[in-house]
Image (cartoon, rainbow, N blue to C red):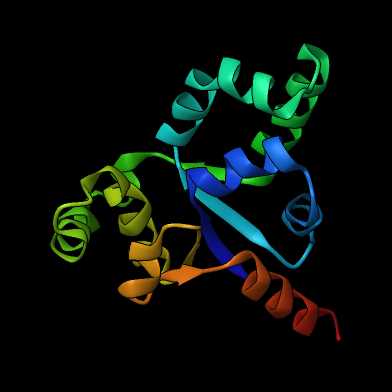
Amino acid sequence: MNLVLDSNVLFRTLISRGEIIEILFNKNLRLFAPEKLKKEFLSHRKEILQKSKLSEQEFNELVSLLFNIVEFVPTNEYKEYIPKARELLKTHLKDVEFLALALKLDCLIWTYEELFFDIGFGISTKQTSSKINLFEL
């Protein structure tokens, strides 16, 4: 199953480290994200370290693992979908690249952003877990 990974799921993964971690490493799941997510994520390093209570080493190891399972896609590979994404998101333009990538890949966005659910592109952690379990039957 292909999904675009929203930044809020990635942040929550490091902060809470619950069921989300198990789902992320499921072999039936293929995750994609805009390349800009790496930079955004690392710019919040201090905040994530503080909230997660991870040591520097634990943080670095977990980030390395996560960055190896997520396929980061350069903007030029989905740029033709950006106008459509802008049209759908209207005023919530900070997430245009996530939606443009989902449009290109014809898949959903694993997110907590209500707007993505409102426009039919969101999938929750619970839904992701249920769908993955179906693949394992």
In the depicted structure, whether residue 21 falls above or below residue 50: below
Q: Quadrant of residue 127?
A: bottom right
Residue 1: give x, y in percent of width and height: 63, 71
Query: Along the line of sight, which residue is nearer the eye, 80 or 4?
Result: 4
Residue positioned 81% across, 15% down in the render:
57
Query: Along the line of sight, which residue is nearer the eye, 86 or 76?
Result: 86
Query: Along the line of sight, which residue is nearer the eye, 116 or 28?
Result: 116
Q: How many numbered marks appear?
A: 0
In the depicted structure, whether residue 111 falls above or below residue 41: below
Image-based side of 67 in relation to 87, left or right = right
Residue positioned 76% across, 13% down in the render:
56
Residue 15: give x, y in percent of width and height: 69, 36
Residue 10: give x, y in percent of width and height: 59, 43
Residue positioned 68% across, 43% down in the render:
13
Query: Along the line of sight, which residue is nearer the eye, 82 or 117?
Result: 117
Residue 112: give x, y in percent of width and height: 49, 58
In the depicted structure, whether residue 40 falls above or below residue 81: above
Image-based side of 62 in relation to 31, left or right = right
Quadrant location, the C terminus: bottom right
Residue positioned 75% across, 68% down in the render:
28
In the depicted structure, whether residue 44 falls above or below residue 86: above
Image-based side of 61 in relation to 83, left or right = right
Q: Quadrant of residue 61?
A: top right
